[in-house]
Image: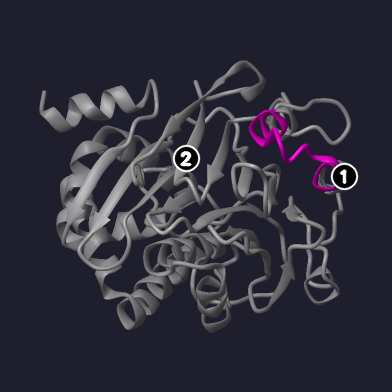
């Protein structure tokens, strides 16, 4: 068994930051090597699932994969080199690695709230609610070009899901279904570009406005920086709307709030979809109330409490298949460069928040 295989096995049990540095290809190769078993397992599950879809859906995935490659070659070719390195390191075909990045979310869970100022500086509370997933890993990137950052995501995904960089810029988000169609820059990959090349919320917003189209994978993205600037970007497949922090905070769940994006949100048709939308709105209402009432002198315990909350609008929900199921929760303190992750994976009302400080300013 190689050293990479041993590390890959450990990551299945608990999060710890696997350091990746060097050129894009070197980072990709090392990532593929370290997470080989996880990536191969993801591929076995997801690619076989795609091939079982009706022919038009399979063709759509192929078109998305080709479009992703084209847009990355034109804008950030280093990411294509990283994907090639990941394919070689994980002993997979490069086209399959592209296909793994050509997918869209099912908007079930994920909640986010930012407080712009507390006794400990700004703070972002975020959940990643994707069910009982074994496919999550923590990676500490030290690229030759751009900022270092730490993030948690599926090891096959070139993008990021939850991250903080060495400048203190924090990223979170949640998925939303939309009815428009676009073939632009994929959301998670755009979040990766933002956290690697931006230092502030304003810089991040400029990139989102430049690359505003998605790949049937739209949603809300929340940004927070060390100065307490915070915003939610509501992104459909062709449009964006920006909500700035008000009254000391901003929040997002799995629906749009702004009129421009709300009219493009996919209508809840089935009884289950109606329940999900009501659930999202209840969580959002609870977070907005939290922004108004949070004890900013004791922010860590307050944010932990809202992340672990239950009942109507609670974030830590224990639903079964197809329902909101708590997976991992995060707290990020940009001014202190602190990144807290709930462990073990699962209901964070029963987990501990472990602090990581890869960019300590002490």
- Is residue 90 among the parts visible in the rendering? no
Query: Going from the N terminus, do you reach mark 1 or mark 2 first?
Result: 1
Asked if residue 348 is positioned above or below residue 234 in the image, the reply reads above
The verdict on residue 171 being magenta is: no
Q: Residue at x 81, y 77 (%)?
A: 260
Foreground: 234 or 165?
165
**Image quadrant in which the C terminus is located:** top left
- Residue designated by label 2: 339
Q: Which mark is residue 289?
A: 1
The reply, left or right, for residue 198 in relation to residue 224 is: left
Q: Can residue 32 be seen from the camera position used here?
A: yes
Q: Position of residue 243 (x, y in %)?
A: 74, 68
Is residue 155 positioned above or below 237 on the image? above
Between the C-alphas of marks 1 and 2, the distance is 24 Å
Mark 2 surroundings: few (<14), some (14-19) or many (≥20) residues within 10 A: many
Query: Residue 333 shows which numbered tag?
Result: none
- Indicate the secondary structure of the residue bearing disc 1: helix
Check disc 1: other Cα within 10 Å, few if <14, some if 14-19, many if 20+: few
Residue 342 in picture, x, y percent from top left: 53, 28
Q: Is residue 318 left or right of residue 259?
A: left
Residue placed furthest toward the top? 350
Q: Specify start and end residues of the magenta stretch as a single range.
A: 289-304
Quadrant showing the N terminus: top left
Which of the 4 image quadrants contains residue 311?
A: top right
Report the side of 245 relative to 262 (left or right): left
The image position of residue 277, as x and y in percent, is: 84, 48
């Amino acid at each position: 068994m190689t050293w990479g295989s041993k590390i890959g096995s450990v990551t299945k049990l608990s999060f710890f930051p696997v350091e990746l540095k060097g050129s894009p290809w070197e980072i990709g190769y090392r990532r593929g090597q370290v997470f080989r078993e996880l990536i191969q397992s993801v591929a076995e599950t997801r690619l076989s699932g795609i091939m079982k879809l009706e022919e038009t859906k399979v063709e759509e995935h192929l078109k998305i994969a080709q479009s992703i490659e084209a847009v990355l070659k034109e804008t950030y070719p280093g990411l294509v080199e990283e994907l090639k390195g990941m394919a070689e390191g994980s002993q997979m075909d490069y086209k399959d690695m592209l296909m793994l990045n050509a997918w869209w979310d099912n908007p079930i869970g994920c909640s986010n709230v930012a407080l712009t100022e507390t006794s400990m500086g700004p703070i972002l509370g975020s959940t990643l609610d994707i069910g009982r997933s074994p496919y999550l890993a923590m990676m500490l990137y030290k690229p030759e070009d751009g900022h270092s950052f730490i993030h948690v995501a599926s090891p096959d995904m070139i993008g990021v899901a939850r991250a903080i960089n060495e400048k203190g810029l924090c990223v979170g988000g949640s998925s939303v279904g939309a009815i428009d169609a676009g073939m632009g820059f994929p959301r998670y990959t755009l979040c990766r570009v933002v956290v690697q090349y931006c230092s502030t919320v304003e810089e991040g917003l400029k990139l989102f406005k430049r690359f505003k189209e998605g790949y049937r994978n739209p949603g809300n993205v929340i940004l927070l920086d060390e100065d307490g600037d915070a915003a939610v970007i509501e992104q459909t497949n062709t449009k964006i709307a920006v909500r700035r922090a008000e009254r000391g905070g901003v929040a997002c769940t799995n629906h749009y709030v702004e009129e421009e994006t709300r009219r493009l949100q996919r209508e809840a048709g089935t009884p289950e979809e109606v329940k999900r939308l009501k659930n999202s709105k209840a969580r959002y209402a609870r977070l907005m109330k939290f922004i108004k009432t949070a004890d900013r002198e004791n922010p860590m315990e307050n944010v932990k409490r809202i992340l672990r909350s239950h009942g109507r609008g609670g974030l830590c929900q224990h639903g079964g298949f197809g329902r909101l199921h708590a997976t991992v929760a995060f707290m990020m303190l940009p001014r202190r460069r602190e990144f807290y992750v709930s462990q073990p994976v699962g209901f964070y009302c029963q987990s501990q928040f472990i602090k990581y400080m890869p960019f300590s300013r002490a």
